[in-house]
Amino acid sequence: MGGSLANGATRRMTVRRRSMAAWLGCAVLLPWPVLAQRRGTIYRIGIVGLAPTADIEGPQPRSRQVAAFLHTMGLLGYAYGEHYVTLAYGVAGHPLGMEGLVRELVRQKPDVIVATGAAVAPLKESTASVPIVMTAALDPVEMGLVPNLRRPGGNLTGLSLQAVESTAKRLQLLKEVVPGGRPVAVVWNQSSLQSWRGAQQAAKARGWALSSMEIRNSTQWERAFQGAAEARASAVLVLAAQVLFPRAKAVAELANSLKLPAIYELRAYVDAGGLMGYGPDIVDIWRRAAGYVDKILDGAKPGDLPIEQPTRFELVVNLRTARELDLTVPKELLIRADEVIR
C-alpha cells in the first residue's frame, strides 16, 4: 500500500509543481508541502478519537489508528511540525464530554477534522464550514448526515462502517463457538440501534433466541452484563462502541469474570482480553482517511468526495481467554482467523 500511496503523492506533486511554476514564473520547482511551508502555512488538523487525549496527541501517538494516519500523511509528503500539526481531543475521560470537546475543537478553526464515527453527528451540528473526514461512522445516510454516499454534499466525507452487515456475521461466529438453544444477550444502545435491528433479523432468519440488554445511559453498562449473566445467556454480542470502547479493558474483564463468552465489533477489546472480535480494520480506515485530508488540503470540496465503505475486515481470536472460559474454539474458525492470540 505504501508504494501506491507514494506513487500517488508523486503524481500529485508533479501536477502541483507544474501549476506552481506557471504561477511563479520561476525555474526552481519545489514539492508542494515545501512551498506551503515557505508561505508560512502549517495546517492544523483536528483529531477526535474515543481513546484518551494522551493516546492520540503529538507526532508519535500511542493509538495505532492515529499513528497509521500520521504515517500515511508522511507517505503523502507531509511532515509533522513542518507542514501540519494536530489538535487532538480524546473522548475517554474528557471533562467536557463529546458535545463539549467538539465545540471546543471547532472554536479553534482547524483546517480539517478527522473524527471517529461517534463524533460525526455533534461535529456536523457544530460547524457547516470546517471539512470533516469521518472514520467509521455507522451509517451516515441512515443517520441523516448525508443524502447519499456518492455525493455527500456539505462539509462531510470519509469512511463509513458496514455495521449492520458485519453484525450478522459476528452473531454467526459466536454461535459457532457457543452453539445450543440458550439465548445470546445483545448489549446495545441507541447509537447502535441499526446494528441491534440487524442482529434481530439475522437471529429470526436462523431461529436463534436473543435477549436485549440495552444501555440507556453510560452508567448502566456493568448492569447490562450482569443482567446477561442472570438471564443465563449462552454468550454476549457486544455493540454500543461509543459507550463501551473507552472502557474496553474493563468490559472484557467483566465479561470474562461472569463467564460470558463475548464477541466485539473492534479488535481493541480482544487485545484487552476479550474472546473474539470481528469487524472492519479500523487501522486501515484511519490510514485511508489521510488520502481524504490530502485532497481537501489540495482544494477539493469534501461534499464532492464519495464516502467509502470498509474493504478489509479482520477476525481475531484470543485463545488465552477461551481457555479461561473452558471453551474449545473450532479448528475451522481458527484457520479462518486473521490473528490468533495464544
Image: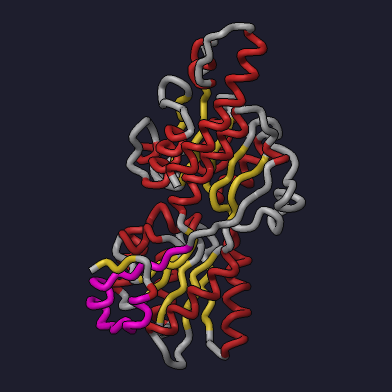
Extent of the magenta region: 313-335
Say if the magenta span includes residue 75.
no
In the depicted view, which residue is nearer to us: 49 or 6?
6
Q: Is residue 107 visible?
A: no
Q: Is residue 208 above or below residue 33?
A: below
The residue depicted at 58 percent of the width and 62 percent of the height is 162
| Place of residue 217 in the rendered image (x, y in percent of width and height, measured from the top left) | 52, 58
In the depicted view, which residue is nearer to us: 232 or 71?
71
Say if the magenta span includes residue 329.
yes
Q: How is the image coloured?
A: secondary structure
| Place of residue 85 in the rendered image (x, y in percent of width and height, measured from the top left) | 45, 26
The residue depicted at 47 percent of the width and 63 percent of the height is 313
Q: Is residue 202 left or right of residue 286?
A: right
Looking at the rendering, in which quadrant would you find the C terminus?
A: bottom left
The residue depicted at 23 percent of the width and 71 percent of the height is 320
| Place of residue 159 in the rendered image (x, y in percent of width and height, measured from the top left) | 58, 50
| Place of residue 116 in the rendered image (x, y in percent of width and height, measured from the top left) | 52, 47
Q: Is residue 187 left or right of residue 318?
A: right
Q: Is residue 111 above or below residue 212?
A: above
Numbered disc total: 0
The residue depicted at 62 percent of the width and 40 percent of the height is 123
Q: Is residue 313 visible?
A: yes
In the depicted view, which residue is nearer to us: 184 or 277?
277
In the depicted view, which residue is nearer to us: 179 or 260?
179
The residue furthest front is 27
